[in-house]
Image (cartoon, rainbow, N blue to C red):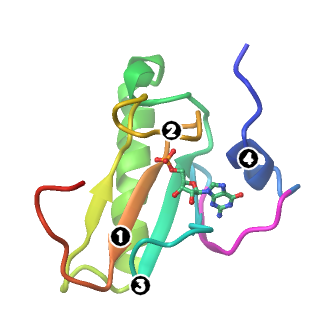
Amino acid sequence: MSIDTVFDRILRKELPSEIVFESDHVLAFKDLNPQAPVHVLVIPKKKISSFNVISDLSAREIGLFFQGVSLVAQKLGLAESGYRIVLNCGRHGQQTVDYLHAHILAGRQMTWPPG
Ligand code: 5GP
């Protein structure tokens, strides 16, 4: 059984969040502790804990998740200037919430390598 996370509670609307996009398949909301002028998190409505277990989703569900991320970036007007998508995974990846989520970071020049 998976543990209940803050993102489960945000999805159930038990916790307030600034939702920027919602579809049948994904929910996108502003990060509480933004690391860029635009910092949005996108979660699939069908929960998995991390990228490690992405194969628990069907190819269609995975596709719908990434289509959702792309759609959110477009709806936020980021397509031309660009953005970074981050999927933190596990301890070394510094994943802190055990619910698969993509960070969309934008609104400033990103640097490489990431910290
Ligand atoms: P991770 O480190 O797991 O990749 O990212 C988790 C993200 O969730 C962090 O950037 C953190 O700021 C954000 N976060 C944690 N708790 C909340 C919350 O209650 N609401 C929102 N909107 N973001 C949160």
Instruction: For mark 4, give the secondary structure.
Output: helix
| Mark carried by residue 33 | none
Residue behind mark 4: 6
Above or below 27: residue 37: below
Ligand 1 is within 8 Å of the C-beta of the residue at disc 2: no
Amino acid of disc 3? Pro
Q: Secondary structure at mark 3?
A: loop
Say which residue label 2 marks.
100
Q: Residue furthest left?
A: 112
Q: CA distance from mark 2 to mark 1?
A: 16 Å
Determine crowd level at label 2: few under 14, some 14-19, many 20+ residues with C-alpha closer than 10 A: many
Closer to the chain start, of discs 1 and 4, is 4
Residue at the extreme front of the image, as rendered: 115
Residue that label 1 marks: 105
Q: Nearer the viewer, mark 2 or mark 3?
A: 3
**Is ligand 1 less than 8 Å from the beta carbon at label 4?**
yes
Percent from the top left, x then y, of residue 106?
Answer: 32, 77
Nearest the eye: 17 or 60: 17
Q: Secondary structure at mark 2?
A: loop
First-in-chain label (2 vs 1): 2
Asked if 87 appears above or below 106 in the picture, the reply is: above
Rounded to the nearest angstrom, the CA distance separating label 4 from label 3 is: 22 Å
- Give the amino acid at mark 4: Val
Q: Are marks 1 and 4 in contact (CB under 8 Å)?
A: no
Where is mark 3, residue-wise?
A: 37
**Bounds of the magenta segment:** 15-23
Quarter holding the N terminus is top right
Q: Amino acid at mark 1?
A: Leu
User: Left or right: where does residue 1 sit relative to residue 43?
Assistant: right
Q: Residue at x 59, y 60 (%)?
A: 23
Residue 8, x across and y down, in percent: 74, 43
